[in-house]
Image: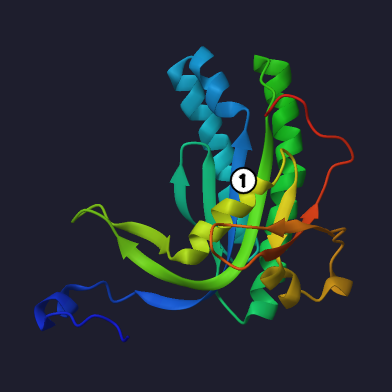
Amino acid sequence: MGAMAMPVHQIAALPKSAERREAVLLYAELRGFARMSDLLDPTLVLLLASDFFGLAAAAASANGGEVVSLHNDTALAAFSGGKPSQCAPQAVLAAQHIQRESGALAEKWRNAYGLRVAVAQGLHLGETVLGQAGPRGVEQRIALGDSVTLTHYLVRRARAGEIVMSDSVMGALSVENLDLDAEPLPQLEIGKRPPIRIYGVLLDARLDFTA
C-alpha cells in the first residue's frame, strides 16, 4: 500500500528540510543519574545533565553527526551525511569518544558529588525520517521511525559502560580501520520480529551500581 494522500495545502506547509534516508543512530544513556538526581539540588541536576548532553553533542559533531533528541538521561544522535560505509565508522568513533570521555566525567562527579554513573550506548543503521517537528514556533530537529525504536532496544540491552550494535552497523564497517573489539551477543528478540544479530564492546566486569 502506498503512502497516504495529503491535501495540497498541508503539503505546502510541511518543513522543506524533511527527508527519509539511511542513517546510523546512536543512543547514549546515562545510567545511575536519574535516581541519584532526586537527592541533588535541581540547579546542580540540570548543570550535570548539560555536561553529559554537551559531551554527546560534541562527540557527534566532531564525527559528522548531530544530536536530534534529548530526553531525561538519554541523547539520540544521527549520522546521515554519506553512505552507510561512511556513517557507520563515524558513529562508532563518536560512541568511543563518549565512552572514553564519560569515564573522566564520571570520576569527576564521583569525587565531587558522590555520584556513580556510566554511559550505555546502542547503535543501529536503518531508514529514518529526519527533519523539523513540534508545536508551531518551537519546532526542533527530530528523528522518527522504526529505526529509532530498534536503537532504543539496543541501548537497553547494553550494560553500563558498554556499546551494543546491530548487525546492520557491523556490516557497514571496515573493521580493520577501527580499533574495535566487538564480540557477538545472543540475538535480540523483539515480539514478532525476526531475531536481530547484535555485537557488543563489553567490559570485563559488570558495573555494580545499576540494575
Q: Foreground: 154 or 117?
A: 154
Q: Is residue 203 above or below residue 188?
A: above
Q: Label 1's element? A: helix
User: Can you give x and y, in whole percent of width and height, for residue 19 in the image?
Assistant: 39, 77
> Which of the 4 image quarters holds residue 71?
top left
Please tell me which residue is depicted at 29% across the width and 82% down the height of the picture.
3
Residue 18, placed above or below residue 165: below
Q: Is residue 14 above or below residue 134?
A: below
What percent of the width, then of the height, locates residue 148? 50, 60
Image coords of residue 57 (percent x, y): 56, 51
Residue 134 shows in this picture: yes
Q: Which residue is denoted by mark 1 in the rendering?
A: 156
Residue at 47%, 14% in the rendered image: 41
Query: Which residue shows up at 59% across the image and 80% down it?
Result: 82
Q: Nearer the viewer, residue 84 or 64?
A: 84
In the image as oriented, which residue stretches furthest toward the bottom? 2
